[in-house]
Amino acid sequence: MPLLHLLHLSNFPIFSQLQIEEALLRASRLNVCIINEGSPLSIVLGISNRYEEHVAHNISIPVIQRFSGGGSVVVDKDTIFLSFICQNDFLQTAVFPEVLFTWSSNFYKKALELPDFHYREYDYVVGNYKCAGNAQYLRKDRFVHHTSFLWNYQREHMDYLKQPPKMPAYRCNRTHTDFLCKLQDFFPSKDNFISRVRSTLKNAFLVKDINLEDVRMEITASLQNTSIYSFYRQKITLFLYHIEYYETISRFFRKHVCLLQSNCSITCEYWRSNIHSRIFAFRYSARINLLFIRAT
């Protein structure tokens, strides 16, 4: 059976999780599954989604743009995240978007054993109601497929999102609350849901549990043989809005220019030439370096 490294987190910030996923995608060859039980309240947009088209006005929570496609989602402590970051040969078949969706749908059908659970227009649904959203990112040798399951949700949080400009046909222009369902209505507990997924993983793969320190060491070791300049030139998960970072951006800019110059052999001129278009990408990709890479 293929070896799968399992990282199980609880209430881990979704921004930090996406940073880890992108670093593993671009700088590692490990097959990794991440289970994260909840995150602080945030909005996450797909890479091509425009803030003004998806996010309501006058919000005060972080808005994150991830490196993968897909739609917009509000996440919080009642969201269950499941991600696969793997080599393309992990599934022992050619990897294309529909192949990944079919494989993941079959995996979750087997794990959850819900009679009306199925994949529909890039969503997982129970009957005619969405219970999870998906997104993916494919490279020539690796892929990410990540899912956010709605264990529960607060109706008022749905007001942070506008009606999306593009909707699946089966939604029939329903509001967020009329379109969604809660998985807590189908399982006795969140632990039961997680246990089902873990058990199915162990039946299909040789599972090895890892922790955040293992991930940090893997990324650090992998980046010794990776072009740091090339790594940072690619798409980067970033914050689009967070009030604290507007107030402190100049301080972080000075700090991270120094950090990158001393640790990563990237010239300050490269970052200064991109500062107007990538200031938040700069601030947070530098933070990845601080937390996980430290390629000295």
Image (cartoon, rainbow, N blue to C red):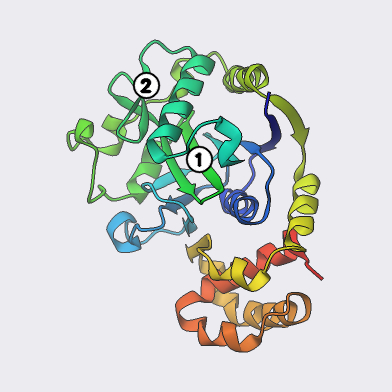
In this view, 83 is above or below 224: above
Who comes first in sequence, dot 2 or dot 1? 2
Q: In the image, what residue type sits under mark 2?
A: His
Q: Residue placed at 32% from the left, 56% from the top?
A: 56
Q: Name the secondary structure under disc 2.
A: strand
Residue located beneath label 1 in the image: 145
In this view, 189 is above or below 257: above
Q: Please tell me in which quadrant of the rendered image residue 153 appears.
A: top left
Residue located beneath label 2 in the image: 118
- Residue 189 pos. (x, y %): 57, 18
- Residue 39 pos. (x, y %): 58, 43
Classed neighbour count for the residue bearing mark 1: other residues with Cα under 10 Å, few (<14), some (14–19), many (≥20) = many
Q: Tell whether 226 sits left or right of 104.
A: right
Q: In the image, what residue type sits under mark 1?
A: His
| Quadrant (top left, top right, bottom left, bottom right) of the C terminus | bottom right
- Nearer to the camera, 90 or 83: 90
Q: Tell whether 157 sits left or right of 231.
A: left
In this view, 206 is above or below 267: above
- Could one spot residue 163 in this view of the protein? yes
- Nearer to the camera, 189 or 222: 222
- Could one spot residue 241 in this view of the protein? no
Q: Tell whether 136 sits left or right of 251.
A: left
Q: Residue placed at 57% from the left, 47% from the top?
A: 40
| Quadrant (top left, top right, bottom left, bottom right) of the N terminus | top right
Q: Name the secondary structure under disc 1.
A: strand
Q: Residue placed at 35% from the left, 14% from the top?
A: 116
- Residue 51 pos. (x, y %): 35, 61
Q: Residue placed at 19% from the left, 35% from the top?
A: 169
